[in-house]
Image (cartoon, helix red, strand yellow):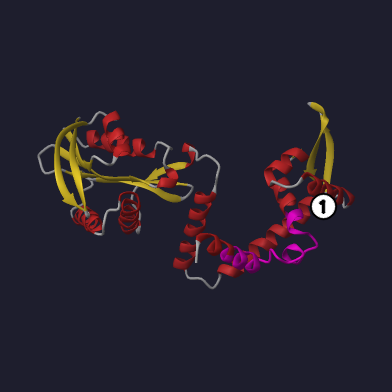
Amino acid sequence: MNAVEEFRQFNRFFTKEIGLLDKHLLASDYTLAEGRVLYELAKNGEQTAADLGRSLAMDKAHLSRIVARFCKRKLIRIRINPAHGKQRLIALATAGEKAFAALDLGSQQQIEGLIAPLSATARAQLVESMRHIHTILDVAAPRPRDVTYRDLCPGDIGWIIHRQMVLYHEEYGWDWTYEGLVCDILSKFVAHFDADRDAAWVAEHNGAIAGSIFLVKGDEEGAAKLRLLYVEPSARGLGIGRELVARCIEEARRKKYRQLKLWTNDILVSARRIYEAAGFRLIDEERHRSFGHDLVGQTWMLDL
C-alpha cells in the first residue's frame, strides 16, 4: 500500500472512531465546523471574522453563516473595534461559553473512553506517535524556543540507538554494523558511568526527542570524548546541534578536562561545520571500510 492510500485509510478510521462523520458533534446540536468556531473563540478570545477565517482556514461565506446562526442563538457578542471603526470584534457570550464547556467536557470524556482500555505503555506510544505525526505535517517553521534540554531518562538509550541507526541508514546507506558500534559505545557508557567524568544531554522539540550528545572519559589522562551527536531531521535548523556541542564543551571544562576529542567521518558535513565553529581542529584523517562503505574517518580536538 502506498503512502497516500495508507494516509487515507487511517483518516477514514480515525474520523469514524471519534465521530467526525456524524451530522452533529458529540451528540450535540452543533456541527463540526460550529464546534471549531466555538473552540477558537474560547481558546483565543475576541477577534475579527477575518482572523477567525484565517485561524480555521474556513470559507468566508461558510463562516458568515455560522456567525449569523450564533448571533440568533445569542452565543456570541459583537462590538465595533474602538481602534478600527470598520472592524467588528466577535467574542463568546455567556451562553456560548456554556455551550463550549459542554462540548469540551464531552470531548474529554470521549477520548478518555477511547484510551481507557489501553495499557500505560500503549498510551505513551500513542501520544508519542501523534506528536511525531504533528511535527512531520506541521508546515509552520519550527521555533527554537520550543526546544528544551534534559538529562537521560529511562528508555532514552534504546531510542537513541534505534534513531541513529535508522537515520544513518536512510541518509548515508550505512548497514546494521553501525548499530553495533552505537550499542557498544552506549553499553560502555552505562556500565562505567561516572557522574564526575561523564554526562549526556537529550534535546526535545514539542515533547519529542530531537537529538542527543554524550561526554565520556577519554583514553588519555585529562582528555574527554564527545560522542554520538545527532539531530532529528524534523528539528534541524533550530540550532540544536550547536547547543548540544556547546553544553558538552562547557561541561568538559567544568569537569577540569584539558582536551576534548571526537571521531567522525568526512561525509558528515553539517556536524563537521558545528565542530569547526566551536573551535575544534582536525588533527588526523584515515581511510577505512566501515558500515558497508569506504569512508574517511577524522579525529578532531579542542584544547580547553
Is residue 187 shown above or below 92?
A: below
Q: Position of residue 131 (x, y in %)?
A: 50, 54
Question: Total of numbered circles in the picture?
Answer: 1
Is residue 202 shown above or below 276?
A: below
- Determine whether, in the image, residue 16 is placed left or right of residue 202: right
| Corner quadrant of residue 115 | bottom right
Q: Residue at x 18, y 53 (%)?
A: 192
- Determine whether, in the image, residue 190 is placed left or right of residue 31: left
Callout 1 secondary element: helix
User: Quadrant of the image for the C terminus?
Assistant: top left
Q: Residue at x 27, y 41 (%)?
A: 267
Q: Position of residue 4 (x, y in %)?
A: 54, 60
Residue type marked 1: Ala
State the residue position of label 1: 95
Which residue is most to the right? 72
Q: Position of residue 225 (x, y in %)?
A: 19, 42
Q: Is residue 7 visible?
A: yes
Is residue 178 shown above or below 283?
A: below
Q: Is residue 257 visible?
A: no
**In this orientation, which residue lies closer to the viewer: 196 or 166?**
166
Q: Residue at x 65, y 68 (%)?
A: 16
Is 25 covered by the magenta stretch? yes
Is 244 covered by the magenta stretch? no
Q: Give the magenta-colored segment's residue range.
A: 9-35
- Determine whether, in the image, residue 232 is placed left or right of residue 168: right
| Corner quadrant of residue 179 | bottom left
Q: Position of residue 223 (x, y in %)?
A: 15, 38
Which residue is most to the bottom? 117
